[in-house]
């Protein structure tokens, strides 16, 4: 609840660009872990990209979303452009939604991003099936649901550096 | 109320409008998608990007690798000794067969020499380790720790101790992509070992393969062994591929539906062998002018011999 901007009484510090890029690099590394067998494993890059698109849309444009997508395509051995298309659309939709959804508490923010996450998976499956691949099963839609559940913890985690106090008080014990 | 509201006030103009950018990137993605899937024209781009992704992949795999390696290191010494003695026993048991094989090979080479046939392909290659499985849920592919730098080429067949695993489909500077024979796009020309009937297996995507284009009245029963026929010029002949597990004959269809289980541990192995590409025999058009004077010189009896030996 604390992190939604309508109820917080604090003014957050600005996000630091290096932290944004570091968190996305970390998400990329998480995505490359050998977790293919687990259907519930969320797409971490999608989660991080969506979060920073909502919060810091000046830092992450469609160009970076596209590059991240191409990177994921090569790393996953998927068709080139598959993740790129999904991520670009995700970025556009998330930036569009950002002015609206930040007024809601975290649980309802998660409801806002749920259709976006489902769409990211749905678009990829749709264009691959269109290209002649077999349908991989409805189990693929578990991971966007998990990603939605992770929206609140990820928000608290990624916003934590911005809750730092503005001035350091060296005499205070903590 | 417009939910998807993007437009900034007109006095804050920053480059092209978001909708135009979106159109541009969507078009670019779809163009890449079509170029890649339909025309397979982007392998250079993939190779370039893989130079960056490869080290990251290896980094991401390293915790797991470290865990399994340390587990192997601390494993009971007795277990290793037992395994070692088992290997010794196997080796001893195989020695007479090996001697016999050498003798047979020599005899075979001699006979083939007499028949003026091309020497059989020697199956050799290099061992490689599987780095990771592709995360793409639509395909069955794995990545090896060797690539262009170690001399791998696209098209090389891949085997394990039991039989065919798949084929190298893309090569990157430091790694290579192997499409398993259970992938939907992967076809392997085979023959039924018992009857010699030739066919092609296609992957089903769920760990099994299907034997296609076999007439409904053909002699195929459960338990039949399928081996490579060697007709494609990719896989050497005689390697085990799969065992028939299910045969359905429906009079409504011209073909029987035959499902087979791969012999090799296709979806779960660690070290595999990449065989060298076969050197194809010259195609008939180029071979005939050279062979023509010989054929006239020798008796016509050479022909039936050649024809009967060809299906090998």
Image (cartoon, coloured by chain):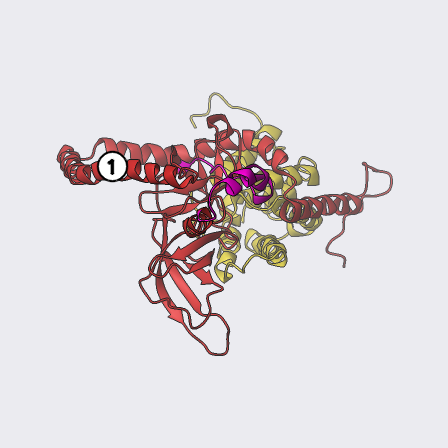
Chain colours: A yellow, B red
With respect to residue B212, does A33 lie above or below?
above
Q: Nearer the viewer, residue B197 or B241?
A: B197
Magenta stretch: residue B299 in it?
yes
Residue at 47% in and 34% down: B57
In terms of image quadrants, where is residue B78? top left
**Disc 1 element:** helix
Whether residue A158 is visible to the viewer of this picture, yes or no, is: no
With respect to residue A105, does A26 lie above or below?
above
The number of callouts visible is 1
Whether residue B172 is visible to the viewer of this picture, yes or no, is: yes
With respect to residue B137, does A159 lie above or below?
above
- For the N terminus of chain B, the quadrant is bottom right
Left/right placement of residue B112 relative to residue B26 reads left
Q: Nearer the viewer, residue A110 or B92?
A: B92
The subunit carrying tag 1 is: B
Decide: few, some or many residues near mark 1? Use Cα within 10 Å; few <14, some 14-19, many ≥20: few
The residue positioned farthest toward the top in the image shown: A170
The residue positioned farthest toward the right in the image shown: B11
Q: Nearer the viewer, residue B179 or A131?
A: B179
Left/right placement of residue B280 relative to residue B40 reads left
The residue positioned farthest toward the bottom in the image shown: B251
List x then y, in percent, for residue A144.
53, 54
List x then y, in percent, for residue B147.
48, 31
The magenta segment: B274-301
Left/right placement of residue B253 relative to residue A17 reads left
In terms of image quadrants, where is residue B101? top left
List x then y, in percent, for residue A97.
68, 51
Magenta stretch: residue B190 in it?
no
Q: Nearer the viewer, residue A16 or B129?
A: B129
List x then y, in percent, for residue B296.
53, 42
Report which residue position mark 1 lands on: B103
């Amino acid at each position: 609840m604390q992190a939604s901007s309508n109820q917080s009484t604090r003014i957050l510090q600005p996000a630091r660009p290096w932290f944004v890029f570091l968190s996305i690099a970390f998400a990329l590394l998480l995505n490359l872990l050998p977790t293919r067998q687990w259907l519930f494993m969320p797409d971490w890059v999608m989660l991080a990209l969506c979060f920073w698109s909502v919060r810091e849309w000046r830092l992450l444009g469609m160009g970076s979303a596209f590059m991240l997508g191409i990177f994921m395509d090569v790393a996953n051995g998927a068709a080139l452009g598959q993740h790129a298309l999904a991520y670009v659309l995700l970025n556009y939709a998330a930036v569009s939604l950002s002015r609206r959804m930040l007024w809601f508490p975290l649980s309802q923010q998660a409801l806002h991003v749920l259709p976006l996450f489902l769409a990211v998976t749905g678009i990829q499956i749709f264009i691959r099936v269109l290209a002649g691949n077999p349908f991989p099963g409805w189990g693929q839609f578990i991971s966007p649901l998990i990603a939605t559940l992770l929206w609140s913890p990820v928000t608290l985690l990624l916003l934590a550096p911005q809750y730092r106090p503005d001035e350091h008080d060296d005499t205070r014990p903590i | 109320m417009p939910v998807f509201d993007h437009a900034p006030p007109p006095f804050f103009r920053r480059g092209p409008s978001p909708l135009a950018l979106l159109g541009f990137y969507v078009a670019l993605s779809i163009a890449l998608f079509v170029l890649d899937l339909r025309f397979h024209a982007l392998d250079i781009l993939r190779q370039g990007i893989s130079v960056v992704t490869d080290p990251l992949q290896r980094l991401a795999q390293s915790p797991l690798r470290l865990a399994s390696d340390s587990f192997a290191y601390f494993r009971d010494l007795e277990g290793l000794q037992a395994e070692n003695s088992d290997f010794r026993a196997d080796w001893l048991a195989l020695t007479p067969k090996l001697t016999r094989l050498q003798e047979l090979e020599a005899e075979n080479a001699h006979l083939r020499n007499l028949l003026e046939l091309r020497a059989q392909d020697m199956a050799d290659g290099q061992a490689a380790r599987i780095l990771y499985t592709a995360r793409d849920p639509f395909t069955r592919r794995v990545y090896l720790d060797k690539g262009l730098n170690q001399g791998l080429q696209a098209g090389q067949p891949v085997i394990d101790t039991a039989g065919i695993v798949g084929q190298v489909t893309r090569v990157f500077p430091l790694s290579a992509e192997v499409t398993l024979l259970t992938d939907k796009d992967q076809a392997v020309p085979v023959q039924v070992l018992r009857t010699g009937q030739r066919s092609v297996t296609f992957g089903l995507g769920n760990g099994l393969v299907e034997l296609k284009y076999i007439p409904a009245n053909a002699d195929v029963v459960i338990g039949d062994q399928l081996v490579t026929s060697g007709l494609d010029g990719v896989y050497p002949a005689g390697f085990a591929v799969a065992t028939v597990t299910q045969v359905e004959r429906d009079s409504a269809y011209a073909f029987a539906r035959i499902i087979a289980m791969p012999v090799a541990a296709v979806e779960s192995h660690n070290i595999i062998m990449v065989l060298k590409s076969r050197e194809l025999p010259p195609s008939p058009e180029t071979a005939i002018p050279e062979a023509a004077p010989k054929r006239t010189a020798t008796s016509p009896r050479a022909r039936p011999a050649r024809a009967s030996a060809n299906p090998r």
